[in-house]
Amino acid sequence: MSNKLKIGLFGYGIVGQGFKTVLDRSPNLNAEIVKICVKNNKQTEERNLVNSLLTFNAEEIFSNPEIDIIIEAIDDAEFALVIAEKALQNGKSLVTANKKMIAENFEKIFQLQQKYWKPILYEAACCASIPIIRNLEEYYDNDLINSVEGIFNGSTNYILTNMFDNGKSYAESLKEAQEKGFAESNPKLDVEGYDSKYKLTIVIAHAFGEFINPKEIFNFGINKINDFDIKYCNEKGLKIKLIAKSYKIDNKIYAYVFPKFTKINDRFFQVEAEKNGVSVESVFLDKQFFIGKGAGGIATGSALLADVSALKHNYKYEYKKKNGIEGFKISNEQILKAYIRFDNDKAVNKPIFHNIEETYTNGNTKYIIGEIYLDKFIESGLAKREDVNIVLC
């Protein structure tokens, strides 16, 4: 690489702007953006971009021999993969925040790096300001990890904090999260747990060395939480957090994304607003907890900048856990304690339960608390019913 890093940036939304902001305030890095590629001019006019930086032609970045690093900060996973491939083909390293692209194409991303001997770094795709991938790769490189779980989505955590601490409705909280740039205009990926699942897929690759198709991980979001669930929490002194969890037993990996009740003495109970929290449990180090901002342009932009800085020192992921294992199988054969709330006039399939501890009915609403078989719950189709909400206990 040249003495001064030359950067080509794809996308100038919240994340792209965040990256440029932190880069402009980091003169010691000795890096500059040469070109910014966007789809249309409407938003860039509002953001006062210098015309000489702007292009609508991706080839101006790919074919520019001065550019060392390409930053991908768009919301299109398919085109993000095209950018990744073309970047490496043209001898450029890639830094990306696109967790969907990485999670759905892990094997290809791995092979591209092997073929072209250029790195792809994606710390910003996981938990924004928390350097969880770097820690799993370096600090835990020789440790045996038992589990990784956490609040991986700052948007949903902001929404839940607003609902439980400020008494606002789900709709109000979502609108506010969108206005602050924590949630997308189409929030489905966040509130239905897909974003957390993609991030969990990435974490599993670096914690356990296994590239898993995200479709193999069950996700259930926060979009079905209603006033009855909130009242239940308030009476019990609980809060709901959206938790992504993976753990290993023998040669199997178990993983899921679910809302979960947390008590005041739970570390996740204390993680508020747009922050993320990650708990890593290993054989040698027991449990360690990481907390930091998990949403917003500056937090994600800072993670992108950290990867740019790492590339300046020729850093790359070594995928050490992948190189040292024979392979694990992912399984949904788990027993989980859960609260299932549903309309009283609609039956819930009892065979999903390993045992039932409590049943409660109030007018048209009913809930059951007990241990469920996750695989049977998935097969039952209950998760698709609009009247059903499930929260892990």
Image (cartoon, rainbow, N blue to C red):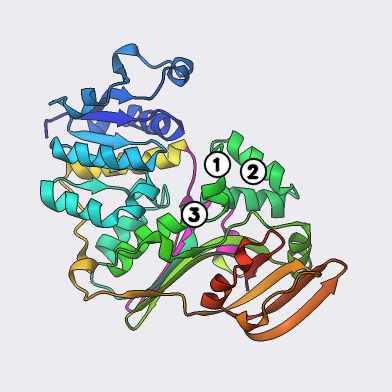
Of residue 112 and residue 20, the one placed in the foreground of this image is 112
Q: Are marks 1 and 3 in contact (CB under 8 Å)?
A: no
Q: Which mark is residue 315?
A: none
Q: Which mark is residue 194?
A: 3
Q: Is residue 294 above or below residue 1?
A: below
Give amino acid for label 3: Tyr
Of residue 31 and residue 160, the one placed in the foreground of this image is 160
Q: Is residue 241 above or below residue 169?
A: below
Which stretch did the figure color magenta? 268-296
Q: Quadrant of residue 354?
A: bottom right
Magenta stretch holds residue 277 = yes
Give amino acid for label 2: Leu
Q: Is residue 387 left or right of residue 242?
A: right
Residue wearing tag 1: 183
Rounded to the nearest angstrom, the CA distance separating label 2 from label 1 is: 8 Å
Q: Are marks 3 and 2 in contact (CB under 8 Å)?
A: no
Give the crowd class for mark 2: few <14, some 14-19, many >=20 residues within 10 Å: many
Residue wearing tag 2: 174
Q: Secondary structure at mark 1?
A: loop
Ranked by sequence position, the earlier of labels 3 and 2 is 2
- The spot of residue 96 in percent (x, y) is 32, 42
Q: Is residue 308 in sight in this rendering?
A: no
